[in-house]
Amino acid sequence: MHPVLEKVTADVVERSRESRAAYLARIDAAIANGPQRTNLPCANLAHGFAVCSAAEKDALSHAVKANVGIISAYNDMLSAHEPYQHYPELIKQAVREAGGVAQFAGGVPAMCDGVTQGMPGMELSLFSRDVIALSTAIGLSHNMFDAALYLGVCDKIVPGLLIGALSFGHLPAVFVPAGPMTTGISNKEKSRTRQKFAEGKVGEKELLESESKAYHSPGTCTFYGTANSNQMMVEIMGLHLPGSSFVNPYTPLRDELTKAAAKQVLKFTALGDDFRPIAHVVNEKAIINAIIGLLATGGSTNHTIHLIAIARAAGIIINWDDFDNLSKAIPLLTKIYPNGPADVNQFQAAGGMGLLIQELLEHGLLHGDILTIGDQRGMAQYSQVPTLNDGKLSWEAGPAVSLDLDVISSVAQPFAAGGGLHVMHGNLGRGVSKISAVAEKHQVVTAPAMVFDDQLDVVAAFKRGELEKDVIVVLRFQGPKANGMPELHKLTPVLGVLQDRGFHVALVTDGRMSGASGKVPSAIHMWPECIDGGPLAKVRDGDIIALNTQTGEVNVQVDQAEFDARVPTANSATGHHFGMGRELFGAMRANASTSETGATNLFFVD
């Protein structure tokens, strides 16, 4: 085991000792009571299985068969979740064949950041994670279930499902993916059209045609943003069946994997002899594995928020320094857009998760001794790949080496020696920066600041030609307390155009960027956030800012005494594109906070 991995893990275990023990004590108390359904009064139980068959009622009333709850994020507007429409019947049939009962326990909201980017709905995106966690808990609150299956893919949805599942940690859990859409036009071509539109070189007709060719069918978007980072993360934690994350929807293999997941969770209930509640599966080592996977693949910076909240739901305390320290030891092993031209289907074809996990395990860069939902208990089985032989599902050894060295490399010859995610620090506070997609020549920028309080004002300034220079865009009042911390994806084409024109540009903000963003250097999630008087609120137009993403330094080059004496500027955003978000945050703000760990604190993160 790599010494840095050993040290970070030991630090997390020690830091979490009391909170983890308290969490497990609560879970073990629930486990000690046996299947919760047996404690329900007769009227309660009758309500719970009123629509079941006579045989199912008899089995459930005597606790001789396991009852599996299904929590789904299905809707048919969101491409990644549309395939879940057919999963409940597949699952119920598979569970019946395996000797159990399955009930649809509840649905959770599933909004799409791609639809809401730059719109009022985006202000609800980050908060939706906590609503999803609450909705998950509500679905499980009937105490009817011996295990649960979780159907979700995208940005806030999987973290919300995980937080809710961990609140009911006495239940075994299997997460069931839907898979990515097939490849459309290349992500590079899509981005090129976006930049042309930002420059006025193409119109809306051409832009919509391009976008529709990129996002064209059921399944996850094919770039390596937060949604696909979620799938990687859940598999490397051992909560997916091996090799199941990136199998396309509406294929025979996808359907057989869904059936297998349904049958698999039945093996781990308290009614059997191999009890694996999710509270025991998601331990400190599993959380560290998720961070490692994120770094090795150049995954979404959104998980510097979500993983902290997920861990806390399991009584585990991690922070940005853990990400930073591991990033110095974990090499970058994949190039998937925006870190390279390939999409997730090409990643899968090159060897996928099996090859990635095998490479990390062989070099002591991943915890192999964790409890998983596979037939075996450790991570070694996750180097295998699922296949169909005469219609029957089985697992075979995956490729020993990359089938495309431009997409998946090796520890011996990585794309970069470090994971490319740094903690930023300096007199502007603390934040994070992902540099895995930033060319080395762009990783250090010193330039005058231009200060904005609204991303649409940045776009307007670009259209007026005011950004045609070396510039560091400072975008303030974008944290959770201010407006819900919407992704600032509208800035990506604008700043990308300026960079391509030869200007030295960067972004510094207390907001966050999309998992799809990449080539422009940035310091994001800056803390303390501006609405709390953070130092970013003291920056003025023309102040020189030095951003060094290689060393993790971000400083305004103003006399420190003068800078300290400045009064933080109030939010000047006009709110012209805001609606529901601004109105709701007044009520929500009392429950919301941030910390330098980057975790939003609403209901489940305390």
Image (tube, rainbow, N blue to C red):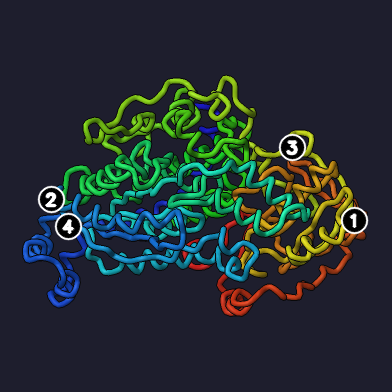
Identify residue for label 4: 101
Residue type, label 3: Gln
Q: Is residue 94 left or right of residue 471?
A: left
Give the structural element (helix, strand or loop) at label 4.
Answer: strand
Pick the residue in front: 210 or 403. Answer: 210
Residue type, label 2: Gly
Mark 1 nearby-residue class (10 Å; few <14, some 14–19, many ≥20):
some
Cα separation, mark 4 vs mark 3, equals 54 Å
Cα separation, mark 2 vs mark 3, equals 56 Å
Cα separation, mark 1 vs mark 3, equals 22 Å
Q: Is residue 597 left or right of residue 450?
A: left
Residue type, label 4: Val
Identify residue for label 2: 99
Give the structural element (helix, strand or loop) at label 2.
Answer: loop
Q: Of marks 1 and 4, which one's residue comes earlier in the chain?
A: 4
Q: Is residue 478 above or below residue 421?
A: below
Residue 430 percent across, percent down from the top left = 71, 52
Q: Nearer the viewer, mark 1 or mark 2?
A: 2
Q: Of marks 1 and 3, which one's residue comes earlier in the chain?
A: 1
Pick the residue in front: 452 or 189. Answer: 189
Residue 476 percent across, percent down from the top left = 75, 63
Identify residue for label 1: 543
Pick the residue in front: 213 or 462. Answer: 213
Residue 46 percent across, percent down from the top left = 14, 74
Q: Of marks 2 and 3, which one's residue comes earlier in the chain?
A: 2
- Residue 550's label in the rendered image is 3
Q: Is residue 157 above or below residue 255?
A: below
